[in-house]
Image (cartoon, coloured by chain):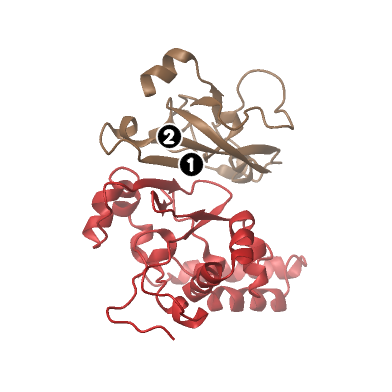
Chain colours: A brown, B red
């Protein structure tokens, strides 16, 4: 693995235009964490935990904009991305735990997509 | 405790420092200042912030709004430190901080993270069975209290503002600071008023 060569497999921007400057998701928005596994494609540095891939949560608030760590880790120019605090109900994450408990996680915007109603029902 | 550094690691660090000095990226003075602030950071800083927040509503509001500014108000240098978020415990919600990806920890106000915080066991279990982890450490939360695990995955660092325990009425900032342990500042324990404690 030679990170200095910039061979990151993250390539985490979803298809489409450049990242918007204003937060895409307001507080309360239902979002799904992209079910993407860049670590299977090659060297990368990502700040989205495994256990949240494909999971539906609720945006608590936007925390600000920060240089994308997936680029910073490979010494590439790192465009800023909106970082959110996203809340996930605990029991469905691991199918254990107590209703009312939850997990609050910092997730970058390019890892989030709007959750469709079916997915929301499944997670509730 | 971590293993002693290998000689080749120290040699590589020396070469890196030499290159940074040669290129004017850092000076010896800057390195010494950073080393001093890193070494002087201790959980007593976070504990004092909590104690002050218990006593002073205005400081509490500042702490919850902007942890970094609240630390600076205590004289802590936060230059170059990540933003500090403060999680307010309530009678209905307890917060527990973990970094499942590595060991993100609010070092500027809590110092070096304890060994257990960086362990695979804590990182795997805290997010999955926080109540069991807390119970093993002697904190049994009542069923009326929800647990919110905060997985510190990115650019913020998180500290907990615990509930002020009963029996501490009339206590001074120093007395209150003394009962806020390092572990309570990430929600792994609760501040306890000593049995039979007398207010000052």
The residue drawn where x is 35% and y is 64% is B190
Q: Mark 2 lies on which chain?
A: A
Is label 1 or label 2 in front?
2
B190 on left or right of A48 = left
The residue drawn where x is 61% and y is 45% is A4
Q: Which callout, 1 or 2, points at the residue further toward the start of the chain?
A: 2
Question: SS of the residue at dot 2?
Answer: strand
Q: Mark 1 points at which residue?
A: A105
The reply to whether residue B81 is visible in this rendering is no
Q: Toward the viewer: A53 or B5?
A: A53
Q: In this view, does B182 lie above or below B85?
A: below
B43 on left or right of A67 = left
Q: Where is residue A8 in the image (x, y as percent from the top left)?
A: 56, 35
Asked which quadrant contains residue B168, the reply is bottom left
Q: Position of residue B136 (x, y in %)?
A: 21, 58
Q: Toward the viewer: B7 or B66?
A: B66
Q: Mark 1 lies on which chain?
A: A
Q: Mark 2 points at which residue?
A: A88
Q: Toward the viewer: A53 or A12?
A: A53
Q: Position of residue A122 (x, y in %)?
A: 37, 19
The reply to whether residue B4 is visible in this rendering is yes
Q: How crowded is mark 1: few (under 14 residues within 10 Å), some or many (20 or more)?
A: many
- The CA distance from mark 1 to mark 2 is 8 Å
A69 on left or right of B112 = right
Contact, mark 1 vs mark 2 (Cβ under 8 Å): yes
């Amino acid at each position: 693995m030679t990170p200095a060569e910039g061979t990151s497999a993250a390539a985490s921007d979803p298809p489409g235009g450049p990242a918007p400057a204003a937060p895409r998701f307001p507080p309360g928005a239902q979002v799904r964490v992209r079910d993407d596994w860049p670590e299977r494609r090659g060297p990368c540095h990502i700040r989205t935990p495994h256990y949240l891939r494909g999971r539906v949560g609720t945006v608590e608030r936007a925390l600000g904009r920060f240089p994308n760590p997936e680029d910073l880790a490979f010494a590439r120019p790192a465009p800023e991305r909106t970082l959110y605090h996203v809340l996930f109900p605990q029991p469905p994450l691991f199918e254990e735990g107590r209703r009312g408990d939850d997990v609050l996680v910092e997730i970058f915007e390019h890892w989030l997509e709007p959750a469709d109603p079916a997915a929301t029902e499944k997670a509730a | 405790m971590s293993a002693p550094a290998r000689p080749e690691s120290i040699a590589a660090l020396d070469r890196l420092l030499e290159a940074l000095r040669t290129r004017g990226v850092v000076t010896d003075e800057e390195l010494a200042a950073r080393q001093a602030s890193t070494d002087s950071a201790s959980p007593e800083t976070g504990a004092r912030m909590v104690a002050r927040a218990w006593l002073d509503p205005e400081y509490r509001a500042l702490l919850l709004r902007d942890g970094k500014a609240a630390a600076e108000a205590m004289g802590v240098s936060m230059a170059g430190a990540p933003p500090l978020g403060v999680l307010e415990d309530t009678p209905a919600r307890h917060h527990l901080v973990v970094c499942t990806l590595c060991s993100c920890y609010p070092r500027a106000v809590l110092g070096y993270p304890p060994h257990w915080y960086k362990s695979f066991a804590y990182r795997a279990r805290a997010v999955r069975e926080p109540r069991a982890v807390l119970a093993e450490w002697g904190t049994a939360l009542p069923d009326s209290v929800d647990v919110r695990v905060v997985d510190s995955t990115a650019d913020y660092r998180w500290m907990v503002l615990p509930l002020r325990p009963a029996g501490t009425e009339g206590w001074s900032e120093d007395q209150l600071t003394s009962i806020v342990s390092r572990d309570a500042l990430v929600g792994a324990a609760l501040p306890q008023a000593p049995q039979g404690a007398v207010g000052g």
